[in-house]
Amino acid sequence: MFSTLLTTIENHICTRTINRPDKLNALNKTVMEELNAAIDEVYTNPAIKSVIITGAGTKSFVAGADINEFIGLSADEGKALAKKGQDIFFKIENASKPIVACVNGFALGGGCELAMACHFRIASENAKFGQPEVTLGLLPAYGGTQRLTQLIGKGRSLELLMSGNMLDANTAMQYGLINHIVPQEELLNKAKSILETINSKAPLAVAKCIVAANAVFDETKNGYAVEIDSFGSCFNTEDMKEGTAAFLEKRKASFIGK
Ligand code: COA
């Protein structure tokens, strides 16, 4: 069991709540280790079809990496910390099940990076996004320079990265960083309703959507070729036969994930 993560699984939707509200849910070593193990479980537990990541309390999603743990690090230790964080966030990004960030307040530094590693983001009205690392003499290193630029474009990204300024939810929406803004008390229900729709679709096809969309940003891959291969492989699945048959027979498809 985890000491910094709360977990519920309901209707195959696993909600992971980062639970250090007195420290605005800052990502210390324990949170990162537990998040890593929690994502491993998402990969392997068939009872989990999709995931919500959120923060405890009403003020903060995650206010960044835990700054206390930066004190006294050497350059090599800083690099190792960044690599570990990037690896965990790659694991989130490349999961074959949808992972949604429910941003319930501050998403700063590593918190903004965590939200961006998720497949999409829903925010409460009080959400604030930013990469304030330059204020500390640092830059984002859990993938933030890359994913922020992918999501909102280079000019807007560099302004945020270099100024450390925060975006409110409305601006984040206008920039395309988040998909929806809802009152805080509706945040989890909004995500659950979207995930229930996704969970009713063919899981292997959903997984292939993630693979193909991620290929856009992977220089080692040709996304169009990935799309062709993914489409072809779906024809080998029982779910594709079921989905097309159900359409033609005017009934609801029942998918088994094979
Ligand atoms: N690392 C460690 N502790 C953090 C933290 C972080 N990233 N962010 C907040 N905390 C802690 C504070 O130190 C404080 O702890 P304390 O009560 O023991 O002193 C507690 O969380 C509450 O934060 P506080 O600063 O008092 O709240 P606030 O409402 O005045 O300000 C923020 C909120 C988010 C603006 C402010 O906490 C902040 O700037 N945090 C750092 C953001 C950051 O630079 N993130 C990138 C890190 S790489």
Image: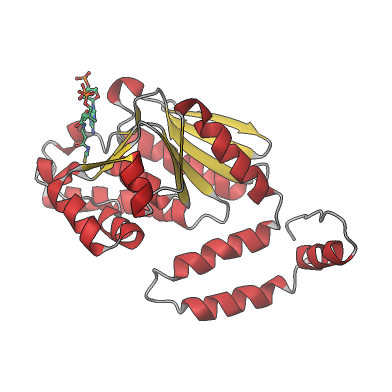
Whether 53 is drawn above or below 162: the answer is: above
- At x 55%, y 42%, the residue is 51
Where is residue 207? Give x, y as percent. 60, 60
* 168 displayed left or right of 68: right
- At x 71%, y 58%, the residue is 202
Where is residue 231? Give x, y as percent. 64, 74
* 252 displayed left or right of 24: right
- At x 40%, y 22%, the residue is 57
**Which quadrant of the structure image shows residue 258?**
bottom right
Whether 214 is drawn above or below 194: the answer is: below
Where is residue 67? Give x, y as percent. 19, 34
Q: Nearer the viewer, residue 142 or 118?
A: 118
Q: Nearer the viewer, residue 153 or 12?
A: 153
View extreme (top): residue: 22
Q: How is the image coloured?
A: secondary structure
* 9 displayed left or right of 92: right
**Which quadrant of the structure image shows residue 195?**
top right
* 182 displayed left or right of 255: left
Whether 41 is drawn above or below 162: the answer is: above
- At x 39%, y 23%, the residue is 58
**Which quadrant of the structure image shows residue 8?**
top right
Q: Nearer the viewer, residue 18 or 155?
A: 155
Whether 223 is drawn above or below 111: the answer is: below
- Report the number of numbered marks: 0
Where is residue 203? Give x, y as percent. 67, 56
In which of the image's four quarters is ligand 1 placed? top left
View extreme (right): residue: 249
